[in-house]
Image (cartoon, rainbow, N blue to C red):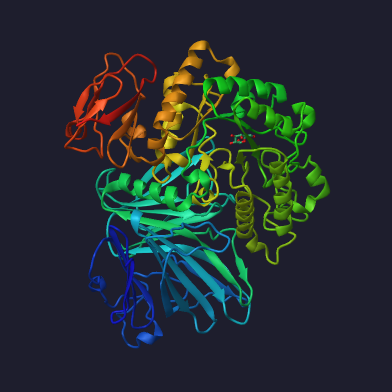
Amino acid sequence: MAVLYNDTEKIFSLNTKNTTYQIKVDSYGYLLHLYYGKTVNTSMEYMLTYSDRSFSGNPYAAGNDRTYSLDVLPQEFPVQGTGDYRSVALIIREENGCCDFSLHYKGHSITDGKYSLKGLPAAYSEEKAQTLEIVLKDSRTGIEVTLLYGVIEDCDIITRSVKVKNSGSENIYIEKIASACLDFLYGNYDAITFYGRHAMERNINRTPVTHGIQSIGSKRGTSSHQYNPFVILAAEDATESAGECYGAAFVYSGNFLAGFERDQFDQIRFLMGLSDEMFSYRLGIGEEFYAPEVLLSYTDMGLNRLSQNFHYCIREHICRGQYKDQLRPVLINSWEACYFDFNGETLCQLAGQAAELGIELLVLDDGWFGERNDDNSSLGDWYANEKKLGMDLKSLSEKIHKKGLLFGIWIEPEMVSENSRLYRSHPEWALQIPGKKPVRGRNQLILDFSNPEVVQYMFDSISSVLCQCEINYVKWDMNRSISDVYSINAVYQGNVLYDYMLGVYSLLDRLTGAFPDILWEGCSGGGGRFDAGMMYYTPQIWCSDNTDAVDRIYIQYGTSFCYPLSVTGSHVSAVPNHQTGRVTDIDIRGCVAMTGAFGYELDLMALTQDEKTKIKQQIQNYHKLAPLLKKGHYYRLSNPFKDGLGVWEVIDSSKETVLLSIILLNVHGNMPVVYIKLQGLDSTKYYKNTENGKVYPGSGLMQYGFPVLAKPGSYPSFQILFERVL
Ligand code: GLA
């Protein structure tokens, strides 16, 4: 059983394949966190110690026992008002401004299967999962809090979420709510976080958790390019292949906060949840609020294993729809091929050339709708610009399909241009504060998705495009940070940003439900909303607007800590690269893009014959590798930030096929040989390099390495496929 409850000791044990998580209801009815780590079969209560700590208050119920303080004890869900002065998971304000309350155990339930969350994305699992719900109550205010735990055994994932119910007699205001809290009694841990910027997302930062509070988060209304909602707490000696580490991924695409605190007694508290800035959620009498889910995983086998747990969980328990398992078509995207400069005829030419090369899907990116010839107008006007195309969308779709390609379009449903029909008829649908001029971003405003009327309009508008003709793919973009949070429809403005996300999710849910055959790709200026929340609706996301193969090695390296290759949109683009001006060989561009949701984004009409031949070969090669890339185990074999190398490996679960990708980032004269140690092979077997037939012992490749001799070029790349032979 995944969830066990010992009624005598009042201890819950949540067990996955390799981990245990333990919670105790103590004698005062408080929930204490006992343990999270490698599987244990006994109670870990003996780890709790009690002593009189000055200035750490004692609950009244403890009477004269000054050794009992929630300021010191490890807690499962600390709230404001119990004498715990560390960061808390929940702050609720009453109408009169009072923020103190106290939660006590009221009951629990254990059920088979994994819970789902109303209106929010969440991991799902029909088999091998259980749910624990623990109900806590504050008797004075009637506030009822239910802690939800999902135990997904096969990938060592424990999920957490929280439901708050206002069972009192007046409105309450949730001022802060974390979905998960982890208290550690001791230990030296590093916080690993992923920072970045537009076109250079998910760089890695590793710093010791020191006294005080360190935090990352977003208040841009999206999960953001700047900090990804995935963090790791790693033992200071943890490496890629050994050591203890905990990962936490937020299944949410809006504002978030992840904080690490080392307290006066060197204990560590980790919290992850919604951002408390720009948030104050009014909950009316009888209403319920759901905090988005956090996925937690633990391993003592190092960072790479932690990543593999998340890859599996996201692939199998987050991504949905027919493209969850189906191989994705190789695409050509019109953006870097022609930007706004196209018509129906030129698109057909592009499609013709694409078909010759073996490309399977043409994506018509920005510029096909309203009167959009640059990025200053028409967002909101989701009907084809027939004047520009020289035909209607149906004829275009038919022509593309006749060339043997699937057809896809780009949309940005959450946005409106002031220069649009939609804005002229409904200015009140844009987020704007009465009496204040709004902040613009890319010369566009944001539609008020907290208003169900707006969501309904967008559903009708986008559906009518998708019904007009055969559309096989949709790229859903979101190209600015949110500001001017004010809805004409809101009962309370503090609710708007969270309700906006619910509106986005509801539109995604309805559209993906109504058009289940479409492949949906997420995007927010590349990787500005690259999170497990979006992945629940869109099984792939454009990873970055930076298509430079060398920069992508760094970006995809950081991305790989949480997210699998199958969700990571990656394209071969032109040189000199449009973002960096760098010139790289077509081989390295292919090698990097292929280890992602693969495609091309360049003017195919401008290719040389040699490039065309190479692209044809690349696509054939990709088809051979696609099943392995989709489901294989991923290993990072270098840190490009430190090693001057990009090296990664993908191996299938039966250890028969291994793809090794190597790019030398620093080339010098008379280069020493580079030796790469592979991982996860069968050490008793031999592996053949399929290109030259050379055979290597699996044990040798793992223990001593694979020699790589540099070849000429600025960034020599090697893509080596090994097959197990003996
Ligand atoms: C964003 C996306 C790009 C492209 C443009 C179109 O920047 O990330 O891929 O779709 O918008 O305007």
Q: Quadrant of ligand 1?
A: top right
Residue 211 percent across, percent down from the top left = 35, 58
Residue 259 percent across, percent down from the top left = 43, 57
**Which of 108 and 429 lies nearest the eye of the viewer?**
108
Residue 577 percent across, percent down from the top left = 52, 23
Is residue 625 placed above or below 53 in the rendered structure? above
The extreme top residue here reads 609
Q: Is residue 140 left or right of residue 58?
A: right
**Which of 453 and 58 lies nearest the eye of the viewer?**
453
Q: Is residue 587 left or right of residue 422?
A: left
Number of dots carrying numbers: 0
Is residue 91 placed above or below 396 in the rendered structure? below
**Residue appearing at x 39%, y 48% in the figure:** 312
**Which of 612 and 224 lies nearest the eye of the viewer?**
612
**Residue appearing at x 79%, y 39% in the figure:** 419
**Residue appearing at x 64%, y 29% in the figure:** 401
Q: Looking at the figure, which quarter contains the N terminus?
A: bottom left
The extreme bottom residue here reads 63
Q: Is residue 332 left or right of residue 1?
A: right
Residue 75 percent across, percent down from the top left = 37, 70
**Which of 591 and 202 lies nearest the eye of the viewer?**
591
Residue 589, visible in the rendered structure: no
Q: Residue 49 occupies which quadrant of the picture?
A: bottom left
Residue 441, visible in the rendered structure: yes
Q: Residue 118 occupies which quadrant of the picture?
A: bottom right
